[in-house]
Amino acid sequence: EAGVVQSPRYKIIEKKQPVAFWCNPISGHNTLYWYRQNLGQGPELLIRYENEEAVDDSQLPKDRFSAERLKGVDSTLKIQPAELGDSAVYLCASSPVAGAVTGELFFGEGSRLTVL
Amino acid sequence: RKEVEQDPGPFNVPEGATVAFNCTYSNSASQSFFWYRQDCRKEPKLLMSVYSSGNEDGRFTAQLNRASQYISLLIRDSKLSDSATYLCVVNPYSGGYQKVTFGTGTKLQVIP
């Protein structure tokens, strides 16, 4: 079974440029998460989707970040314009059961962003 | 106070040693707890769940202390391959959705 797929794996841009990350979750997983992980820190939730509905975007910096999950499958996370402090690894994860307490999130390999 | 706090380490231990990590959480209503493992430049992966009665998986033992609001992970007979960052994860299970919160992680380095 294919895991969570993310692209691009690496992205280097100059500040003020836009950037987009794409995620394809595991088939059948209706919950999708975007996390940001800074060096030496744990992942921090940006947004969580249940199917196509964003049910928790309280930590998403909405002035420059946007996300969408059309048709409740693939998702895109966009930053426009990027700032130096946005350099991080952006992790997408999915889980199989909405509202469950299993706690098992399946992560993609992440998209490493460097803003110069 | 952070929702989930861990000692960042690093913990440098010799092969064969026993090492323990603690993690404290602030939300007393938290319902479920987990340990994840993250290798260098890799994604986090579930290591084990933490049950109220404590649970063991081979050389790994997880404990939960609800009264003091902490969970622990004990690794016995450490192997070189155990070198990684261990992330404590708490799920308050609020409103029927998963609000999974990660700690900052504790780095373990097992030395030959």
Image (cartoon, helix red, strand yellow):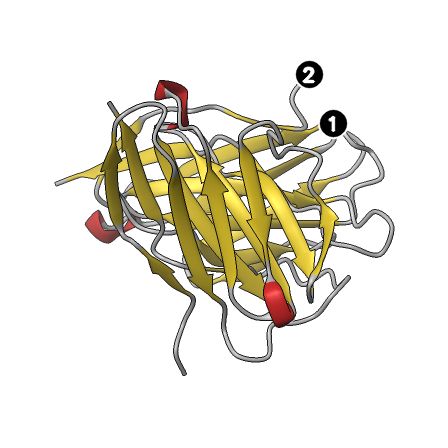
Q: Residue furthest top?
A: B1
Q: Which mark is residue B1?
A: 2
Instruction: Using the image, determine if residue B11 lies above or below residue B1.
Output: below
Q: Position of residue A81 (x, y in %)?
A: 43, 28
Q: Position of residue A110 (x, y in %)?
A: 36, 50
Amino acid beneath label 2: Arg
Instruction: Using the image, determine if residue B60 lies above or below residue A35.
Output: below
Between discs 2 and 1, the one toward the N terminus: 2
Looking at the picture, tell me which residue is in the foreground, B100 or A75.
Answer: A75
Q: CA distance from mark 2 to mark 1?
A: 7 Å
| Co-location on one chain, circles 2 and 1 | yes
Residue in view at x 83 percent, y 47 percent = B94
Q: Position of residue B75 (x, y in %)?
A: 41, 47
Q: Which residue is mark 1?
A: B26
Looking at the picture, tell me which residue is in the foreground, A64 or B68.
Answer: A64
Say which chain tag 2 marks.
B
SS of the residue under disc 2: loop
Amino acid beneath label 1: Ser
| Relative side of A32 to B10, left or right | right
Say which chain tag 1 marks.
B
Q: Residues within 10 Å of mark 2 (few under 14, many from 20)?
A: few
Residue in view at x 36 percent, y 33 percent = A88
- Does the rendering let one see residue B72? no
Residue in view at x 47 percent, y 57 percent = B47
Q: Residue furthest left?
A: B112
Quadrant of the drawing holding the C terminus of chain A: top left
